[in-house]
Image: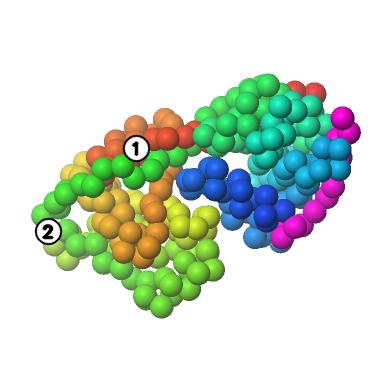
Amino acid sequence: MAIQLQSCTAAEALPLRMRYREEMNCQIVHDSIHTRPGWTEMYLLQLDKISAGFSTVAVNGPWKDKRTVLEFYLLPEHRNHAFEIFAAFLQTANCCAMEAQSNDTIATVMLHAFASEIVTEKIVFRDAVTTSLSAAGATLRCVTSPDETQVQLTQRSGSTEFILEVDGEAAGQGSILCHYNVPYVDLAMEVAEPFRRRGFGSYIIQELKRVAYELGAIPGARCSPTNVASRQTLQKAGMVPYASMLVAALRP
Protein backbone atom coordinates (compact mmCIF):
# COMPACT_ATOMS: atom_id res chain seq x y z
CA MET A 1 0.00 0.00 0.00
CA ALA A 2 1.50 3.32 -1.12
CA ILE A 3 0.27 6.59 0.44
CA GLN A 4 0.82 9.79 -1.52
CA LEU A 5 0.19 13.39 -0.46
CA GLN A 6 -0.20 16.13 -3.05
CA SER A 7 -0.41 19.84 -2.27
CA CYS A 8 -3.48 21.38 -3.91
CA THR A 9 -5.71 24.45 -4.06
CA ALA A 10 -9.10 24.82 -2.41
CA ALA A 11 -10.69 24.60 -5.86
CA GLU A 12 -8.96 21.28 -6.60
CA ALA A 13 -10.17 19.84 -3.30
CA LEU A 14 -13.72 21.18 -3.70
CA PRO A 15 -15.30 17.95 -5.07
CA LEU A 16 -14.08 16.06 -1.99
CA ARG A 17 -15.12 18.90 0.30
CA MET A 18 -18.61 18.71 -1.20
CA ARG A 19 -18.73 15.06 -0.13
CA TYR A 20 -17.49 16.09 3.30
CA ARG A 21 -20.18 18.77 3.65
CA GLU A 22 -22.88 16.32 2.61
CA GLU A 23 -21.80 13.82 5.25
CA MET A 24 -21.52 16.46 7.96
CA ASN A 25 -25.01 17.79 7.11
CA CYS A 26 -24.64 20.66 9.58
CA GLN A 27 -23.00 24.01 10.14
CA ILE A 28 -19.23 23.58 9.69
CA VAL A 29 -17.74 26.21 11.96
CA HIS A 30 -14.47 26.80 10.08
CA ASP A 31 -15.79 26.29 6.55
CA SER A 32 -15.10 29.88 5.40
CA ILE A 33 -11.37 29.65 6.04
CA HIS A 34 -11.02 27.97 2.65
CA THR A 35 -12.10 31.17 0.87
CA ARG A 36 -9.47 33.37 2.57
CA PRO A 37 -6.29 33.62 0.47
CA GLY A 38 -3.20 32.51 2.34
CA TRP A 39 -5.03 31.07 5.33
CA THR A 40 -4.80 27.37 4.46
CA GLU A 41 -2.64 24.68 2.94
CA MET A 42 -4.55 21.78 1.43
CA TYR A 43 -3.50 18.27 0.56
CA LEU A 44 -5.06 15.58 -1.61
CA LEU A 45 -4.60 12.16 -0.04
CA GLN A 46 -4.03 9.20 -2.35
CA LEU A 47 -3.82 5.48 -1.77
CA ASP A 48 -1.98 3.59 -4.50
CA LYS A 49 -2.50 6.67 -6.72
CA ILE A 50 -6.28 6.58 -6.15
CA SER A 51 -7.96 9.61 -4.61
CA ALA A 52 -8.79 8.79 -0.99
CA GLY A 53 -9.52 12.16 0.68
CA PHE A 54 -8.15 15.55 1.64
CA SER A 55 -6.86 17.50 4.62
CA THR A 56 -6.79 21.19 5.51
CA VAL A 57 -4.05 22.90 7.52
CA ALA A 58 -4.67 26.39 8.95
CA VAL A 59 -1.59 28.62 8.67
CA ASN A 60 -2.85 32.19 9.13
CA GLY A 61 -5.18 34.26 11.30
CA PRO A 62 -5.50 32.74 14.81
CA TRP A 63 -3.35 29.83 13.61
CA LYS A 64 -0.50 31.95 12.24
CA ASP A 65 2.07 30.74 14.77
CA LYS A 66 0.85 27.14 15.05
CA ARG A 67 0.18 25.03 11.99
CA THR A 68 -3.10 23.32 12.84
CA VAL A 69 -4.95 20.42 11.22
CA LEU A 70 -8.55 21.61 10.73
CA GLU A 71 -10.07 18.95 8.48
CA PHE A 72 -9.21 15.37 7.65
CA TYR A 73 -11.62 13.52 5.38
CA LEU A 74 -11.48 10.10 3.75
CA LEU A 75 -13.93 8.54 1.34
CA PRO A 76 -15.79 5.65 3.05
CA GLU A 77 -14.07 2.94 1.02
CA HIS A 78 -10.62 4.04 2.29
CA ARG A 79 -11.37 4.48 5.99
CA ASN A 80 -9.97 1.08 6.89
CA HIS A 81 -6.57 2.75 6.33
CA ALA A 82 -7.41 5.94 8.28
CA PHE A 83 -4.66 5.68 10.90
CA GLU A 84 -1.90 4.91 8.38
CA ILE A 85 -2.96 7.73 6.06
CA PHE A 86 -3.23 10.26 8.89
CA ALA A 87 0.20 9.30 10.25
CA ALA A 88 1.72 9.70 6.78
CA PHE A 89 -0.02 13.06 6.40
CA LEU A 90 1.41 14.31 9.71
CA GLN A 91 4.93 13.39 8.63
CA THR A 92 4.57 15.79 5.69
CA ALA A 93 2.33 18.53 7.06
CA ASN A 94 4.58 19.56 9.98
CA CYS A 95 1.67 20.52 12.26
CA CYS A 96 1.80 21.02 16.02
CA ALA A 97 -1.94 21.27 16.78
CA MET A 98 -5.30 19.95 15.68
CA GLU A 99 -8.92 21.08 15.93
CA ALA A 100 -12.02 19.03 15.21
CA GLN A 101 -15.78 19.44 15.31
CA SER A 102 -16.78 16.49 17.45
CA ASN A 103 -19.55 15.28 15.10
CA ASP A 104 -16.84 14.89 12.42
CA THR A 105 -16.22 11.25 13.30
CA ILE A 106 -12.97 10.49 11.45
CA ALA A 107 -11.22 13.72 12.45
CA THR A 108 -12.31 13.35 16.07
CA VAL A 109 -10.99 9.78 16.27
CA MET A 110 -7.66 10.95 14.80
CA LEU A 111 -7.49 13.80 17.31
CA HIS A 112 -7.96 11.46 20.27
CA ALA A 113 -5.45 8.97 18.85
CA PHE A 114 -2.67 11.39 17.91
CA ALA A 115 -3.12 14.39 20.23
CA SER A 116 -3.10 15.33 23.90
CA GLU A 117 -4.17 18.28 26.08
CA ILE A 118 -7.64 18.10 24.51
CA VAL A 119 -9.92 21.01 25.41
CA THR A 120 -13.50 21.87 24.45
CA GLU A 121 -13.28 25.42 23.10
CA LYS A 122 -16.93 25.93 22.08
CA ILE A 123 -20.27 24.13 22.19
CA VAL A 124 -22.13 24.15 18.87
CA PHE A 125 -25.94 24.41 18.83
CA ARG A 126 -28.62 23.71 16.23
CA ASP A 127 -32.28 24.66 16.16
CA ALA A 128 -34.70 22.01 17.42
CA VAL A 129 -37.74 23.66 19.04
CA THR A 130 -40.00 26.46 17.82
CA THR A 131 -40.65 28.86 20.69
CA SER A 132 -43.17 31.63 21.25
CA LEU A 133 -41.42 33.85 23.77
CA SER A 134 -42.81 37.32 24.35
CA ALA A 135 -40.91 40.40 25.46
CA ALA A 136 -43.28 43.16 26.56
CA GLY A 137 -42.21 46.55 25.31
CA ALA A 138 -39.34 45.12 23.24
CA THR A 139 -38.82 45.45 19.49
CA LEU A 140 -36.06 43.87 17.42
CA ARG A 141 -35.28 46.11 14.46
CA CYS A 142 -33.07 45.16 11.49
CA VAL A 143 -30.55 47.86 10.55
CA THR A 144 -29.09 46.09 7.49
CA SER A 145 -30.82 46.65 4.16
CA PRO A 146 -32.52 43.67 2.45
CA ASP A 147 -30.26 44.10 -0.60
CA GLU A 148 -27.10 44.01 1.51
CA THR A 149 -28.36 40.93 3.33
CA GLN A 150 -28.95 39.10 0.05
CA VAL A 151 -25.43 39.97 -1.11
CA GLN A 152 -24.01 38.61 2.14
CA LEU A 153 -25.91 35.36 1.79
CA THR A 154 -24.78 34.96 -1.81
CA GLN A 155 -21.14 35.77 -1.09
CA ARG A 156 -21.15 33.90 2.25
CA SER A 157 -19.64 36.85 4.13
CA GLY A 158 -20.66 39.66 6.47
CA SER A 159 -23.58 39.86 8.87
CA THR A 160 -27.10 41.22 9.14
CA GLU A 161 -27.42 43.43 12.21
CA PHE A 162 -30.34 44.07 14.56
CA ILE A 163 -31.01 46.47 17.45
CA LEU A 164 -33.22 45.54 20.41
CA GLU A 165 -35.21 48.49 21.71
CA VAL A 166 -37.16 48.42 24.97
CA ASP A 167 -39.66 51.24 25.40
CA GLY A 168 -37.70 53.19 22.81
CA GLU A 169 -34.32 52.68 24.47
CA ALA A 170 -31.45 50.64 22.95
CA ALA A 171 -31.16 47.50 25.09
CA GLY A 172 -29.18 45.01 23.04
CA GLN A 173 -28.20 43.75 19.62
CA GLY A 174 -28.23 40.66 17.48
CA SER A 175 -26.47 39.38 14.37
CA ILE A 176 -26.99 36.79 11.66
CA LEU A 177 -23.51 35.87 10.42
CA CYS A 178 -23.33 34.52 6.88
CA HIS A 179 -19.77 33.15 6.50
CA TYR A 180 -20.68 29.47 6.80
CA ASN A 181 -21.41 26.60 4.44
CA VAL A 182 -24.72 26.81 2.57
CA PRO A 183 -27.43 26.96 3.89
CA TYR A 184 -26.21 27.62 7.44
CA VAL A 185 -25.81 30.89 9.33
CA ASP A 186 -24.68 31.67 12.87
CA LEU A 187 -26.64 33.69 15.44
CA ALA A 188 -25.16 36.05 18.02
CA MET A 189 -26.69 38.40 20.56
CA GLU A 190 -25.78 40.74 23.40
CA VAL A 191 -27.98 42.44 25.97
CA ALA A 192 -26.90 45.58 27.82
CA GLU A 193 -26.32 45.07 31.55
CA PRO A 194 -29.36 47.06 32.82
CA PHE A 195 -31.68 44.85 30.72
CA ARG A 196 -30.27 41.42 31.55
CA ARG A 197 -32.09 38.59 33.34
CA ARG A 198 -35.39 39.62 31.77
CA GLY A 199 -35.51 37.09 28.91
CA PHE A 200 -34.45 39.50 26.18
CA GLY A 201 -31.47 37.38 25.08
CA SER A 202 -33.65 34.36 24.31
CA TYR A 203 -36.18 36.62 22.61
CA ILE A 204 -33.44 37.98 20.32
CA ILE A 205 -32.31 34.44 19.38
CA GLN A 206 -35.90 33.38 18.74
CA GLU A 207 -36.49 36.30 16.39
CA LEU A 208 -33.14 35.83 14.63
CA LYS A 209 -34.12 32.19 14.01
CA ARG A 210 -37.37 33.31 12.43
CA VAL A 211 -35.62 35.81 10.15
CA ALA A 212 -32.97 33.24 9.17
CA TYR A 213 -35.63 30.79 8.01
CA GLU A 214 -37.41 33.55 6.09
CA LEU A 215 -34.08 34.14 4.27
CA GLY A 216 -33.84 30.45 3.38
CA ALA A 217 -31.04 29.79 5.87
CA ILE A 218 -30.68 27.32 8.76
CA PRO A 219 -29.61 28.89 12.07
CA GLY A 220 -26.83 27.67 14.33
CA ALA A 221 -25.01 29.15 17.31
CA ARG A 222 -22.00 28.68 19.58
CA CYS A 223 -20.92 29.56 23.10
CA SER A 224 -18.14 28.83 25.58
CA PRO A 225 -18.69 25.61 27.57
CA THR A 226 -18.29 27.62 30.80
CA ASN A 227 -20.77 30.35 29.83
CA VAL A 228 -23.81 29.07 31.70
CA ALA A 229 -25.92 32.16 30.95
CA SER A 230 -25.39 31.82 27.19
CA ARG A 231 -26.14 28.09 27.29
CA GLN A 232 -29.39 28.73 29.08
CA THR A 233 -30.32 31.59 26.75
CA LEU A 234 -29.81 29.45 23.64
CA GLN A 235 -31.70 26.48 25.08
CA LYS A 236 -34.63 28.66 26.14
CA ALA A 237 -34.87 29.85 22.53
CA GLY A 238 -35.10 26.25 21.26
CA MET A 239 -31.43 25.63 20.39
CA VAL A 240 -29.86 22.31 21.40
CA PRO A 241 -26.19 21.23 21.65
CA TYR A 242 -24.95 18.73 19.08
CA ALA A 243 -21.17 19.12 18.89
CA SER A 244 -18.07 20.52 20.56
CA MET A 245 -15.14 22.35 19.00
CA LEU A 246 -12.11 20.41 20.24
CA VAL A 247 -8.57 21.82 20.28
CA ALA A 248 -5.48 19.78 21.08
CA ALA A 249 -1.69 19.57 20.79
CA LEU A 250 -0.38 16.89 18.45
CA ARG A 251 2.04 14.51 20.12
CA PRO A 252 5.57 14.47 18.66
Q: Magenta stretch: residue 99 in it?
A: no
Q: Which of the 4 quarters of the picture holds residue 33?
A: bottom right
**Residue in the picture at 44% in, 39% down:** 124
- Disc 2 residue type (three-letter): Gly
Within 10 Å of disc 1 (Cα), the crowding (few <14, some 14-19, many 20+) is: some
Toward the viewer: 1 or 65?
A: 1
Q: Position of residue 221 (x, y in %)?
A: 41, 46
Disc 1 designates what residue? Answer: 240
Which structural element holds mark 1? strand
* Quadrant including the N terminus: top right
> Furthest residue to the right?
2
Select label 2 or label 1 by which is in front. 1
The residues colored magenta run 1-12
Q: Earlier in the sequence, mark 2 or mark 1?
A: 2
Q: Is residue 147 above or below residue 76?
A: below
Which structural element holds mark 2? loop
